[in-house]
C-alpha cells in the first residue's frame, strides 16, 4: 500500500499553474496585491491540474492519537491518561478542535492508532447529526516503546501505522472531502517530533526541541537531552524514512505521514497543523519529494521545530498566532484562507468582463 501510494504521486501541473498565473494577472486588482494567496492559488491549480482549481471543500480533520514510551523519561508533567481522556472530549464535541471545526463546517474523525490506556465512555456530541465526531479503532500497539532505550517501533509497526493513515485519507476522500486537515493527540508527542525534525533536517536538538505544553526549565533541559540521546543511540538515516519513524517517531506521526502521502496521490490539498504534523510532513517528503506540492502550512507553531521543518520543506505558514495546542486547531483557523485563495479564481471578474480599465 505504501509503495503504490508513492507511485501515484506526481509533480504539479505546469500548464494549470501557468493558466492560474495568467488569470491572476487579468483579475480586477493590482497585480500581486493578494500576496501569498496568489501563489497558493497557483499551487492549488497545479495540484488539481485545472484552472480554476476545485474549491477545497468539504473539509475533513483526521486526529490521530497515540501514546509514547518516552513519557517515562519525565519530558512532560501531564499524565499519559490525558490522551484517552481527550479522545472522550473530542467525541463529546468539547475540545477546541470541535469548536473550530463547527465554525469551519469541517468533519472530525478521531483515529486511535496507539493509545496506551482504555478509552473512556464518551458523552455524545450535543450537536449530534451526521457531522458528529466519529472514532476509528485502528490500534497498532498500546503506545510506542521508550526511544531512549530501544526503537520506538518496529519497521512493521511503523509501516502498519503509515497504512492506517493512507486508508483513513482514502475513506475521507471517497466520502467527498476536498481538503484534509491534520490533527493529533498524544501526551509527550512533541519529544519524538523534535527527534524527527532533527533527524530529517540535521538540525541540533536544541533547535528542534520546544517546551510543548509549557514545561519548566529543568524539564526542558531533560527533554533536549532525551532527544539528543535518542538520536545518538539510533543514528537514524534520513534517506530511510520508515526507519526514522520506527526509531524515534510515534504512531500518530507515522499515520499522519500516510495521510499526507495519500492526499498527494489523490491530488487533494492537505492542510498541515503544528509541529507534529510538519515533522510527519518531513517523513512524507522523504518518501516522495513531490508530496510537498500537496502540502499547505496552516500556521507557524510556537514550537521551534516547526519553523525548522517548514524551512526545510520550503513552506511558508499562512498564519502566525503563537499557537501550540495541536489537535488540528491551527489548520482549521487557516482553512478560510485556503478557500479564499481558490475562490478568487472562481469568482473575481477580469478587467475585460467587468469593463474596468487597466493601468
Image: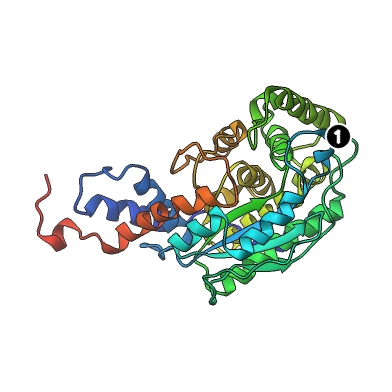
Picture coordinates of residue 53 (x, y %)?
A: 40, 62
Instruction: Mark yes or no: residue 6 visible.
Output: no
Q: Residues within 10 Å of mark 1 (few under 14, many from 20)?
A: many
Picture coordinates of residue 311 (x, y %)?
A: 55, 34
Q: Residue at x 68, y 22 (%)?
A: 217
Judge whether 207 appears above or below 70 on screen.
above
Q: Residue at x 73, y 35 (%)?
A: 195
Q: Residue at x 44, y 55 (%)?
A: 335
The mark total stands at 1
- Residue tagged by mark 1? 148
Residue occupying the far bottom of the picture: 129
Locate the C terminus by quadrant: top left
Q: SS for tag 1?
A: loop
Locate the N terminus by quadrant: bottom right
Q: Quadrant of residue 60?
A: bottom right
Instruction: Mark yes or no: residue 133 visible.
Output: yes
Picture coordinates of residue 177 (x, y %)?
A: 52, 68
Foreground pick, 323 / 118: 118
Q: Quadrant of residue 122?
A: bottom right
Picture coordinates of residue 281 (x, y %)?
A: 63, 46
Q: Quadrant of residue 197?
A: top right
Amino acid at each position: 500500500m505504501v509503495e503504490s501510494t508513492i507511485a501515484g504521486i506526481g509533480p504539479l501541473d505546469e500548464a494549470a499553474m501557468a493558466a492560474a498565473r495568467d488569470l491572476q494577472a487579468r483579475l480586477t486588482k493590482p497585480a500581486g496585491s493578494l500576496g501569498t494567496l496568489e501563489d497558493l492559488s497557483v499551487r492549488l491549480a497545479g495540484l488539481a491540474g485545472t484552472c480554476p482549481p476545485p474549491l477545497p471543500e468539504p473539509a475533513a480533520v483526521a486526529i490521530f492519537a497515540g501514546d509514547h514510551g518516552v513519557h517515562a523519561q519525565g519530558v512532560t508533567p501531564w499524565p499519559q491518561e490525558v490522551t484517552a481522556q481527550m479522545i472522550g472530549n473530542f467525541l463529546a464535541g468539547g475540545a477546541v478542535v470541535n469548536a473550530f471545526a463547527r465554525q469551519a463546517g469541517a468533519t472530525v474523525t478521531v483515529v486511535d492508532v496507539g493509545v496506551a490506556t482504555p478509552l473512556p465512555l464518551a458523552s455524545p456530541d450535543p450537536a449530534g447529526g451526521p457531522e458528529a465526531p466519529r472514532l476509528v479503532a485502528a490500534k497498532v500497539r498500546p503506545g510506542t516503546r521508550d526511544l531512549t532505550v530501544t526503537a520506538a517501533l518496529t519497521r512493521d509497526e511503523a509501516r502498519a501505522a503509515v497504512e492506517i493513515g493512507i486508508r483513513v485519507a482514502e475513506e475521507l476522500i471517497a466520502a467527498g472531502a476536498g481538503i484534509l486537515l491534520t490533527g493529533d493527540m498524544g501526551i509527550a508527542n512533541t519529544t519524538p517530533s523534535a527527534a524527527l525534525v532533527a533527524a530529517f533536517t540535521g538540525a541540533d536538538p536544541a533547535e528542534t526541541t520546544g517546551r510543548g505544553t509549557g514545561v519548566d526549565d529543568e524539564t526542558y533541559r531533560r527533554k533536549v537531552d532525551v532527544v539528543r540521546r535518542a538520536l545518538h543511540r539510533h543514528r537514524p538515516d534520513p534517506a530511510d524514512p520508515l526507519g526514522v519513524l520506527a526509531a524515534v517517531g510515534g504512531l500518530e506521526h507515522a499515520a499522519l505521514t500516510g495521510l499526507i502521502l495519500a492526499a498527494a496521490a489523490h491530488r487533494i490539498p492537505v492542510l498541515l497543523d503544528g509541529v507534529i504534523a510538519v515533522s510527519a510532513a518531513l517523513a512524507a517528503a522523504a518518501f516522495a519529494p513531490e508530496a510537498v506540492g500537496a502540502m499547505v502550512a496552516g500556521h507557524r507553531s510556537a514550537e521551534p521545530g516547526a519553523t525548522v521543518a517548514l524551512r526545510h520543506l520550503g513552506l511558508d505558514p499562512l498564519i502566525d498566532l503563537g499557537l501550540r495546542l495541536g489537535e488540528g486547531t491551527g489548520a482549521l483557523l487557516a482553512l478560510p484562507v485556503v478557500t479564499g485563495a481558490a475562490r478568487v479564481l472562481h469568482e473575481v471578474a477580469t478587467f475585460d468582463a467587468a469593463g474596468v480599465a487597466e493601468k
